[in-house]
Image (tube, rainbow, N blue to C red):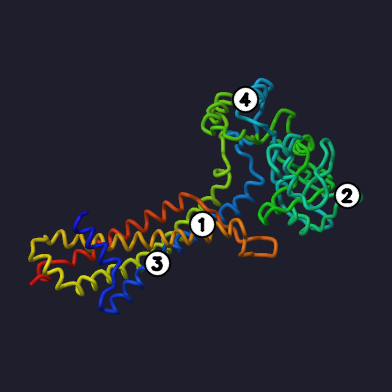
């Protein structure tokens, strides 16, 4: 066995005659365990919160969305539709008409998006699963599904065919408009369902049939504003992008869920980085305590070190002893802390012993990448602190 490792192991597992040094070393070890636990738990909690937040956003978003790079609308011809149906990577697709319009009901008004969808829309997203009142509308009807926030602000009820929800949109065309009453298209809509996902989405959409939206907005029968696509499980997104580009050409842009929620993803990534840096600061402070403990051990073992030096053990080998001791203590704290943290996360994930509400457990998510981040962080900082502490061994110590 290597001499430096053997001595380092003895120093790491044995107690010093000086109780103060034992206490300092114990505090450093417990600190590494605690900081390792804290780092992994914080990252796992944030991963759970991130997944929880994205689940709400993803409820309204398809796997891929096609938009035109020129103007507001584009056309899907029969040949392109046939190629979409033959694609082995696409489960379903839905044609969409979307536009911001003005709504009025009972002298209350707001601006929101009207979204005309075809019958395949509920196969592309699970929006209809988020209805908490009423039902999804039938095609070729004037019924609509509104967000909970829109319903609350306008005071909308369901299936009230005596009082319709008025929607106004500017008429397409050019030139001056002499009569303001003729400047807008108008349609009466009748809510048949109310959905609830989150505050942002609940105040954004009014869903209707695509034919109603086309007639209301004055669009041609073949025009759409975007095409939403659901991919098969395991489909390669990059290959699908190439396939769609070959079908539609370069006049369309393709966005996945991350790109559709670009600001949300950037915010979550920034928050994740902040949590990691804050937790790492705690780890750094803890490992500097380890460096201090090793320095105290070096001073305490000064006589023994003189003996080793006099019998031929080099200064470098003696430094290696305390460098190795620091690594042993670091790895001990890492594995104990990581084991405890993983246990806590798995218990919460499966048994939900911490609840936000009586029906909602606090979200956590065990991810292998978080474990790898923790291991790399603790090991790297442990190496640095052990190297700094072992560097205090010099020739003055042996004089």
Q: Earlier in the sequence, mark 3 or mark 1?
A: 1
> Mark on residue 149?
none
Give me the C-alpha separation between circle 4 and circle 1: 38 Å
Q: Residue placed at 22% from the left, 54% from the top?
A: 1
Q: Secondary structure at mark 2?
A: loop
Can you identify the residue that label 2 sits on? 159
Q: Secondary structure at mark 3?
A: helix
Specify few, some or many for label 4: CA neighbours under 10 Å numbering under 14, 14-19, or 20 or more: some
Q: Earlier in the sequence, mark 3 or mark 4?
A: 4
Mark 2 vs mark 3: in front? 3
Would you say the residues marked 2 and 4 are in contact, meaning their CB atoms lie under 8 Å apart?
A: no
Would you say the residues marked 2 and 3 are in contact, meaning their CB atoms lie under 8 Å apart?
A: no
Question: Left of 82 or right of it: where is 37?
Answer: left
Q: Earlier in the sequence, mark 2 or mark 1?
A: 1
Give me the C-alpha separation between circle 2 and circle 4: 40 Å
Question: Left of 288 or right of it: where is 100?
Answer: right
Q: Secondary structure at mark 1?
A: helix
> Mark on residue 282?
3
Q: Position of residue 209 (x, y in %)?
A: 78, 38
Q: Secondary structure at mark 4?
A: loop
Give me the C-alpha separation between circle 3 and circle 1: 17 Å
Q: Residue placed at 19% from the left, 58% from the top?
A: 3
Mark 2 vs mark 1: in front? 1
Give me the C-alpha separation between circle 2 and circle 3: 58 Å
Q: Position of residue 175 (x, y in %)?
A: 69, 37
Can you identify the residue that label 1 sits on? 44
Question: In this view of the protein, which residue sits in the foreground, 47 or 81?
Answer: 47
Mark 3 vs mark 4: in front? 3
Q: Earlier in the sequence, mark 2 or mark 4?
A: 4
Quadrant in the picture for the C terminus: bottom left
Can you identify the residue that label 4 sits on? 87
């Amino acid at each position: 066995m290597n001499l430096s490792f053997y001595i380092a192991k003895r120093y790491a597992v044995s107690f010093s005659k000086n109780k103060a040094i034992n206490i300092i070393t114990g505090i450093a070890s417990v600190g590494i365990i605690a900081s390792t636990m804290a780092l992994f738990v914080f990252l796992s909690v944030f991963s759970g919160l991130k997944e929880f937040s994205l689940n709400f956003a993803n409820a309204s978003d398809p796997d891929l969305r096609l938009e035109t790079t020129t103007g507001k609308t584009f056309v899907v011809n029969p040949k392109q539709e046939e190629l979409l149906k033959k694609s082995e990577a696409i489960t379903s697709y839905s044609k969409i008409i979307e536009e911001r319009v003005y709504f009025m009901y009972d002298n209350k008004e707001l601006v929101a998006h009207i979204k005309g969808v075809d019958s395949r829309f509920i196969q592309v997203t699970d929006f209809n699963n988020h209805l908490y009142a009423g039902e999804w509308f039938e095609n070729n009807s004037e019924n609509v599904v509104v967000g909970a926030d829109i319903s609350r602000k306008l005071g909308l009820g369901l299936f009230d065919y005596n009082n319709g929800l008025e929607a106004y949109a500017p008429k397409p065309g050019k030139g001056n408009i002499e009569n303001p009453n003729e400047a807008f298209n108008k349609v009466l809509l009748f809510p048949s369902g109310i959905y609830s996902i989150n505050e942002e989405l609940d105040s954004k959409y009014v869903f209707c049939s695509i034919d109603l939206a086309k007639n209301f907005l004055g669009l041609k029968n073949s025009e759409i504003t975007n095409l939403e696509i659901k991919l098969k499980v395991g489909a390669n997104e990059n290959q699908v992008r190439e396939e769609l580009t070959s079908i539609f050409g370069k006049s369309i842009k393709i966005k996945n869920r991350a790109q559709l929620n670009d600001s949300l993803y950037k915010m979550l990534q920034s928050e994740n980085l902040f949590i990691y840096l804050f937790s790492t600061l705690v780890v750094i402070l803890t490992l500097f305590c380890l460096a201090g403990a090793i320095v105290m051990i070096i001073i305490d073992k000064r006589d023994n070190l003189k003996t080793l030096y006099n019998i031929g053990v080099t200064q470098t080998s003696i430094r290696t002893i305390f460098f190795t001791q620091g690594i042993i203590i670091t790895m001990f704290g890492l594995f104990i802390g990581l084991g405890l943290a993983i246990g806590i996360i798995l218990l919460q994930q499966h048994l939900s012993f911490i609840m936000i509400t009586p029906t909602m457990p606090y979200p956590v998510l065990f991810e292998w990448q978080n474990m790898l981040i923790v291991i790399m962080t603790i090991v790297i900082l442990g190496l640095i602190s052990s190297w700094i502490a072992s560097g205090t061994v010099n020739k003055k110590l042996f004089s």
